[in-house]
Amino acid sequence: MPPNAEAFKPARMFAALANPHRFMAFSRWAAPILGVNGKLDDQAPVDDIYLLMEHGSPKAARVYADGHHMGRTPGQPSDHITTTIVEWLRGQLGGA
């Protein structure tokens, strides 16, 4: 395991999001990031996306006003969310 691998375990990454001082370590990320969230998400607060958008680059975000986790809205199809993610990935891969 590389020396920095411990820092990238999910539990450590989420802890860093919750602590602004540790979050600064993520400011140097250069990989593209797409954040998808709903304003009503009770699993991953939408504030995490706003914090992510303030640090590092490149990144993009899509926040669904009536959405819950991953932007999903109860009773509504999630096709639009899937399309948004796939189109973003295609763009990152050079329009493949």
Image: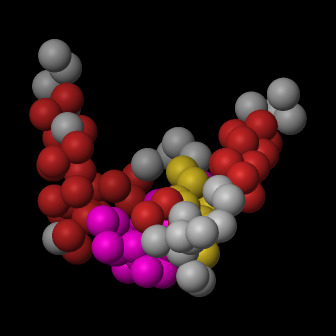
Query: Residue 91 vs residue 67: left or right?
Result: right
Q: Which residues are magenta?
A: 37-58
State whether residue 50 appears in this view.
Answer: no
Query: Residue 26 vs residue 67: left or right?
Result: left
Task: Give the residue drawn at x 55%, y 64%.
Answer: 72
Q: Nearer the viewer, residue 2 or 87?
A: 87
Q: How many marks?
A: 0
Task: Give the residue drawn at x 38%, y 79%.
Answer: 47
Task: Give the residue drawn at x 48%, y 80%.
Answer: 39
Residue 57 lies within the magenta run: yes
Quadrant assignment for the N terminus: top left
State whether residue 64 appears in this view.
Answer: yes
Give the x, y percent position of residue 49: 44, 70
Quadrant assignment for the C terminus: top right
Q: Nearer the viewer, residue 38 or 20?
A: 38
The residue most toward the top is 1
Query: Residue 64 vs residue 14: left or right?
Result: right
Position of residue 39 relative to residue 95, above or below, is: below
Residue 64 lies within the magenta run: no
Task: Give the residue drawn at x 20%, y 38%.
Answer: 9
Give the x, y percent position of residue 37: 50, 67
The residue most toward the front is 75
Q: Nearer the viewer, residue 18 or 80?
A: 80
The residue most toward the right is 95
Position of residue 39 relative to residue 17, above or below, is: below
Give the x, y percent position of residue 52: 43, 67
Position of residue 61 relative to residue 25, above or below, is: below
Give the x, y percent position of residue 56: 47, 61
Position of residue 55 relative to residue 84, above or below, is: below
Residue 16: quarter of image: bottom left
The colour scheme is secondary structure
